[in-house]
Amino acid sequence: MRPGVAPAAALVSLSLLTLAAGGLPSSALPDRMADTGGGSRLNTAVAPGTGSTSGTLTWWDREDGRWVAAGTAPARFGAKGLTEGTTRKQGTNTTPTGLYGPPYAFGIEAAPRGTAYTHRPVRQNSWWCQDSGSRSYNRWSEPRAADCRAAEAEHLISYRAQYAHALVVDFNYRRPVRGRGAGILLHVNGRAATAGCVSVPKDAMRRILRWADPGRAPHLAIGTTGGRTAITRY
């Protein structure tokens, strides 16, 4: 989804994810979540609140029956913050909260060595259709489908920084609801907040691609530190 231009907000400290009130150690964040997707790897993207445009992404491994943080990076969210994924509306520049899987990776640049996910190279005729009237809604389209208007699609190669590396997020993907949103991704940072995706620095994105083993069923959980969109609810 096209990057936004909103200013970044304060970052969520990793300590918020691992310390309980009073500074005492608590269970790891995934242990406090309602669902982690059933796999042994998990990304958590956490913002301070629904109005935030930045926060923290942490990737976790489940080892010997417990979740261990394998890495962390500053993250950016939609220019209009975050919203409940099940009621999100397209064009609102909000990041959908919830728990999602990554169907595949893509990139303008070659996949980092060690990437296990299916990786699609971006070509001159690669598009992501966001036209709710198209049969290709919320799908990669190469070339752009005849019923998908260019004004309602992303020409992927035009976003050389952001789409150097990306993972597709299966928000509204398996059974798309028209008008809920399309093209939600985990990708490399642009100049500012996004139009609904989650973004991280390029080096972090490359690390995530090498870490994300489809055989361990990784998921991406997006949420806030508390409230109705708290990440622990997903």
Image: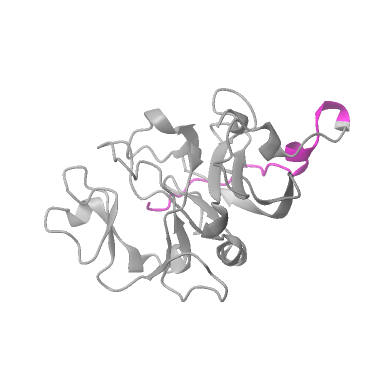
The answer to whether residue 80 of the structure is visible from this angle is no
Q: Residue at x 52, y 45 (%)?
A: 77
Q: Is residue 12 magenta?
A: yes
Kindly indicate the quadrant of the structure image that contains residue 36.
Answer: top right
Can residue 123 be spotted in the picture? yes
Is the magenta region chiefly helix, strand or loop? loop
- Asked whether, in this view, residue 153 is left or right of residue 108, the answer is left
**Front residue of this view, candidates 61 and 124:** 61
> Which residue of the protein is positioned furthest toward the left in this rendering?
146
Return the x and y of residue 185 as percentages of the image width and height: 44, 52
Q: Nearer the viewer, residue 121 or 203?
A: 121
* Residue at point 54%, 41% (across, down): 37
**Per the image, is 14 magenta?**
yes
Q: What residue is shown at x 57% (from left), y 73% (from top)?
A: 114
Residue 109 rendering spot, x and y as whole percentages: 45, 75
Which segment did they paint magenta? 1-22
| Relative vertical location of residue 126 with respect to residue 40 in this rendering, above or below | below
Quarter of the image containing the C terminus? top right
Name above or below for residue 75 compared with residue 175: below
